[in-house]
Amino acid sequence: MSTLMNHQYRLAARPLGLPKDSDWQYGSEPVRELQDGEILVKVLYLSLDPAMRGWMNDSKSYIRPVDLGAVMRAGGIGRVIASKSPKFAEGDIVSGGVGVQEYWIGAADDKHGSFFKIDARLATLPAWLNALGMPGMTAYFGLLDVGQPKAGETVLVSGAAGAVGQTVGQVAKQLGCRVVGIAGGPDKCKFVVEELGFDACIDYKNGSVKDGLKQHCPQGVDVYFDNVGGDILDVVLTRINMKARIVICGAISQYNNTTPVKGPANYLSLLVNRARMEGIVVFDYAPRYPEAVRQIGQWMAQGAFKSREDVVQGLENFPQALLMLFEGKNFGKLVLQVAPE
């Protein structure tokens, strides 16, 4: 085991704006010997998420920042190649916080969270980082618990073709809602409507979001699931209905600002409409993940639910792949394949 070399990306500097090559240190170290209660995981896939940008900042948040010099935090899927834990056997496929590296070694239940076995028969491994992974859990509980949609209501979703957005819209359709997406470009909008079953999609890159809302949400917006923040959030606030619910999931338009985050100028619409704006952090729902996996898995088995991933090959391509999130280049959930299955 000590002959294995583990290639890793460590955080070398706090980024200012978009992460650049000098913010990363790419190196390798030998994999140490396995101790009692530990497992050794060969990483197969990594989940690349907008939240990773926030984890690089040295500021107070819902989770502590990645330390300088530490392996970059990332969720992923891997195969157990050695085990001294009764919880896992060699060959098990597991999901957990593996980090941006080729191998993870440590206690199966450590201070950073637990690994869990996944059923590769239920869905592809990349789908376990999408609809059945953290984005799917975020969408499911954010929509149901925070958004509280009712049949017949209008649900608006930004970042509709992305990892969280595609699940939000499909869950809302299962509940009998009218669903409108906001996405960038005709191909993404076509996918959202024709493949995912949204009722309409507004192309923010090729038209006015304000005009799109007037056309596709003529009765206003009851639930807005926000993944982007910024100007789009501000415009949506002018179209919300009485007692509307706004789910704040992310603000990808603001993550690489070198100036302060732009807050909503139209926030008084919350007062006028007696509306509510509330954040969602998926880790709060960890004990309930199996509930969401069962329901989404059932819909997938029925052919009523789709999970689209954009898979980039090679650990060495991590810095460039991460930037795809902030340039709108990924189509679906962005996944980095580290090793063959």
Image (cartoon, rainbow, N blue to C red):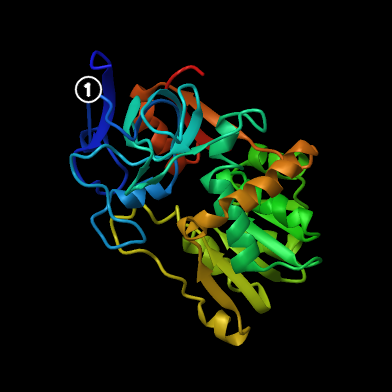
* Residue at the (47%, 71%) spot, across then down: 264
Viewer-proximal residue among 95 and 235 = 95
Left or right: 168, with 198 as reference point: left
Label 1: few (<14), some or many (≥20) within 10 Å? few
Residue 334 rendering spot, x and y as whole percentages: 50, 36
Left or right: 238, with 314 as reference point: right
Left or right: 95, with 195 as reference point: left
> Is residue 269 positioned above or below 71 on the image?
below
Left or right: 189, with 26 as reference point: right
**Quadrant of the drawing holding the N terminus:** top left
* Residue at the (56%, 85%) spot, across then down: 271
Viewer-proximal residue among 236 and 156 = 156
Name the amino acid, label 1: Ser
Determine which residue is flagged by label 1.
Answer: 28
Residue 259, picture quadrant:
bottom left
Element marked by disc 1: strand
Viewer-proximal residue among 268 and 168 = 168
Residue 267 rendering spot, x and y as whole percentages: 50, 78
* Residue at the (50%, 41%) spot, across then down: 328
Answer whether residue 53 is visible to the viewer in this image: yes
Residue 83, picture quadrant:
top left
Residue 200 rendering spot, x and y as whole percentages: 75, 52
> Is residue 33 positioned above or below 132 on the image?
above
Answer whether residue 182 is visible to the viewer in this image: no
Give the mark count: 1
* Residue at the (46%, 31%) spot, across then down: 88
> Is residue 59 positioned above or below 273 on the image?
above
Residue 245, picture quadrant:
bottom right
